[in-house]
Amino acid sequence: MIFLVAAFLLLGLLVGTAAHIPVTATVVAATVIGCWLLVFAFRERKRRQGS
């Protein structure tokens, strides 16, 4: 639950700042978040298949 709160807080900060920072910084941040989510999904799928 704390993880979800932290994720939403980070998302809110990034979405709020997206209007104030350059497009390239927004794209870089979105790419980093997207990669992190893909790694997380892969690890979760692998963990669930193993058990």
Image (cartoon, grey):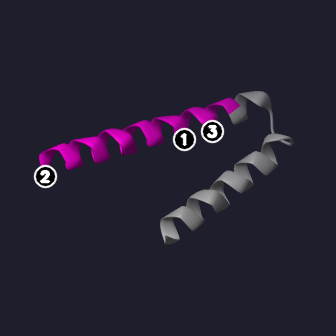
Q: Main secondary structure of the magenta part?
A: helix
- Report the residue at 52% width, 36% height from top: 34
Q: Which quadrant of the figure has residue 23?
A: top right
Could you say whether the residue bearing mark 3 is in a helix, strand or loop?
helix
Q: Position of residue 35 (x, y in %)?
A: 47, 35
Q: Tell me the crowding category of disc 3: few under 14, some 14 to 19, or many 20 or more residues within 10 angstroms, Cα based.
A: some
In the rendered structure, which segment of residues is drawn in magenta?
Answer: 27-51
Three-letter code, disc 2: Ser
User: Which residue type does callout 3 highlight?
Assistant: Ala
* Residue 25, position as x, y percentages in the image: 70, 34
Give the residue number, with chain letter if any, for mark 2. Answer: 51
- In the displayed structure, would residue 1 be above or below residue 47? below
Q: Which residue is mark 1?
A: 33
In this rendering, would 5 be left or right of 19? Answer: left
- Dot 3 and dot 1 residues touching (CB under 8 Å): yes
Q: Circle 2 — which element? A: loop
* 22 vs 19, nearest the viewer: 19
- Give residue 10's position: percent from left, percent from top: 64, 56
Mark 1 crowdedness (10 Å alpha carbons): few <14, some 14-19, many ≥20 = few
Q: Amino acid at mark 1?
A: Ile
Provide the residue designation for mark 3. 29
Q: Is residue 45 left or right of residue 22?
A: left
Taking 22 as reference, is 48 left or right?
left
